[in-house]
Structure formats: C-alpha cells, structure tokens
Image (tube, rainbow, N blue to C red):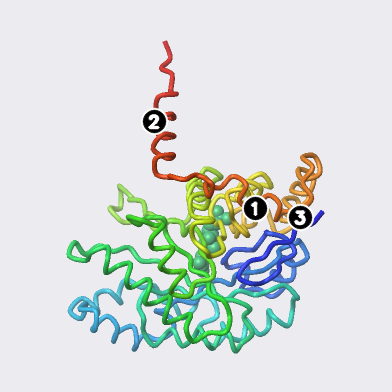
Amino acid sequence: MDLSTKYLGLTLQNPLVAAASPLSEDLDKIRQLEDAGASAVVMESLFEEQIDVDSFELDRHLSGGAESFAEALSYFPDLSSYNTGPDGYLEQIAKAKAAVKIPIIASLNGVSSGGWIRYAKKMEQAGADALELNIYTIPTDPALTSELVEQAYVTLVSDVASGLGIPVAVKLAPYFTNLANLSRRLDLAGAKGLVLFNRFYQPDFDLEALEVLPSLKLSTQYELLLRLHWVAILSGRVQTDFAITGGVHTAQDVLKSMMAGAQVVEIASAILKNGIGYLKTIENDLIAWMVEHEYESIQQMQGSMSQRSVANPNAFLRANYIKVLSSYALKA
Ligand SMILES: Cc1cc2nc3c(=O)[nH]c(=O)nc-3n(C[C@H](O)[C@H](O)[C@H](O)COP(=O)(O)O)c2cc1C
C-alpha cells in the first residue's frame, strides 16, 4: 500500500503529520511520534512576542497603537517559562533533527512584519525542513478595512518567504470575506502550503467571579467539516498544497481530507487524548479501508471529492445550501 504524499516539496511516508503542540517540547515524544508513524512533526510555535519585545514595541508604535502599547503588553502571559524560549527553540530544532529521520517543521506565530521574522532564517539554519507561519490575529478596530488586514498577511508572508531556502506554509483562520482570493495572494507572495484552519479560541465567562476564563478544549470531529468544505473549494483553484488541521480524529477523517484535496492532515487533539500510539491505529485503519475499497495509493484519491471540476462553485454551493435547508423535515 502506497501511503506516501508530497507536501511542501517533501516526500512524506504518509499523510499523518503531528500538529504543533507541546509534544514537540520533548525529544522522547518526538521519537515516539516517529515510531508511531508520524511522517513529520510540526513544532510548537515560537511567538513574535517572545522573540523581541523591542521590535514588537517598535512595530506597534509604527502601526499607530503607541498609546495603548503598554496596556497591550500587560495582557500577555509571562512567556519566559513557555516552551524553550527563542534560543532554546533553535537548539530544540537541531536536537530533533538529530533524533529522528522524519522532517521537522518549525513554527513561528506572529502578525507584524518586524525584526522578529529574522528568526525564520535562524530556524532554517538550525535544520528545520520547512516553516509553518501561524498568523493568529483578530482585528477589532472598526476603522481597519479588510483590504488592509489582508495586505498585512500578504506582506508578512512575502517578507518571511523571500529570505528563506526552505518552504513556508501559512496557518490561517477561516474568517475572511473571500478566502479564495486571499489564498491566491498568499500563493503569489511565496506560500507553498496553506494549513486550514487555526481553531478560534473563545474564552468563556465565569458568572460568579465575573471573570473571563481562557479555556482550551480539544477538538471534536465536527470541526473537520469546515476544513473539508474549504479545501474542497480551494484545491485545484489555488496552486499551494493544503494541510487540514482541526477535527481529524480517525482514519475516515484522514480519507475525507485526502479526497477533499489535502496533501496531509495535522493532528493534535486525537494524539493528546488517546496517546501517541493512537497514530498507529489511524494508519492501520487507513490501510484496512484502502484494501477493502481497492485503493492502491493515497495520491490516487487526493482531490477526488474536490470541487475543481465544478464550473461555478458559488452557484453549486448556493444550490446545495438551498437543498440542505429544504431537506429538513419537521416532525409531525
Ligand atoms: C495544547 C495545544 C497546544 C497547541 N499549540 C500550538 C502552537 O504552539 N502553534 C500552533 O500553530 N498550533 C497549536 N495548537 C493547534 C494545533 O496545532 C492544531 O492545529 C489544532 O489543535 C487543531 O487540530 P486538532 O483538531 O487535531 O487538535 C495547539 C493545540 C493544542 C491542543
């Protein structure tokens, strides 16, 4: 059975990539991920705010947020004890590369085109096979137009990718007016892959303490549907590779992701919940399904359920929407 796939120019033994999570902080866990069948590991992110508070300050001043900067910084948790810090992160890349044969994908998490992006080059020099750039930002300024927000994404991706020899994938949230257009612009700016999607962490309220509670809940399979939907729309229309992350818990989820048009899936919650060995279960189930359904390779199924052959996807999606609503039968 040929499970191999090509992602960011790398040939991977299967589409099961370990998503960015605290598992990559520990070399033993990285080795266990390789033994359990992970074809690559994405490291936990290094944050822009961790790298260079000075450049962060400068960027915020330049982008007009000077008066609120001190207040903004006070929101950030103390990052000194979070993962290994900037220097430790580079060492961890080098150690991980020495410990396993599978590709190691470094992860940078930031929003502004500042001095911090020089770390991308350092990550490459430390041995990273690729870089995942996670752009996590929630625009809240009513005066900020979507055009400006998207231009900032494009500029950041171009700034990061232009100086690098290794491929860059961009991890995004789903909330854009026209994701298809932004995806194409990110492709032209140098992104070799799109990682869909960031989960939107929504804090809850504690009604007794009247406090905002940050809460990280692991994903459910339901979250996969949004990802399948978008990869099916974009694959073939945008030239980048696609990674689906969010809600991949079983071999069936992997199969659906491949058929939508993804090259890999990036899994965190299912591994954190069931243990690293669970990746082997997913791989075995994947093979069993493919044998039963007479598939010989993963590449054979990639994109088979995408909408690349639909001439007018907009009309197609609207028709489906009407069909879904009208298919609901009220109980008597
Ligand atoms: C505990 C935890 C830590 C995470 N840390 C990061 C991170 O540092 N950088 C990042 O890009 N994503 C991070 N993620 C998101 C995952 O990489 C993944 O994209 C997301 O959880 C969706 O996949 P899943 O449904 O398999 O969990 C984290 C997720 C969890 C659960």
Quarter in which the N terminus is drawn: bottom right
Relative to 293, 228 lies left or right: left
Q: Secondary structure at mark 3?
A: helix
Seen at 69% across and 56% down, the residue is 275
Seen at 35% across and 66% down, the residue is 137
Find residue 322 and name its label. 2
Ligand 1 closer than 8 Å to label 1 CB:
no
Q: Amino acid at mark 1?
A: Gln
Q: Secondary structure at mark 2?
A: helix
Q: Residues within 10 Å of mark 3 (few under 14, many from 20)?
A: some
Q: Nearer the viewer, residue 281 or 326?
A: 326
Q: Is residue 330 visible?
A: yes
Find residue 280 and name its label. 3
Marks 3 and 1, the one that precedes in the sequence: 3
Quadrant of the image occupied by residue 330: top left
Q: Secondary structure at mark 1?
A: loop
Residue 33: image x %, image y %?
A: 71, 65
Circle count? 3
The residues tagged by marks 1 and 2 sit, at their Cα atoms, a distance apart of: 28 Å
Residue 208: image x %, image y %?
A: 30, 48
Marks 1 and 2, the one that precedes in the sequence: 1
Q: Which residue is mark 1?
A: 302
The residues tagged by marks 3 and 1 sit, at their Cα atoms, a distance apart of: 21 Å
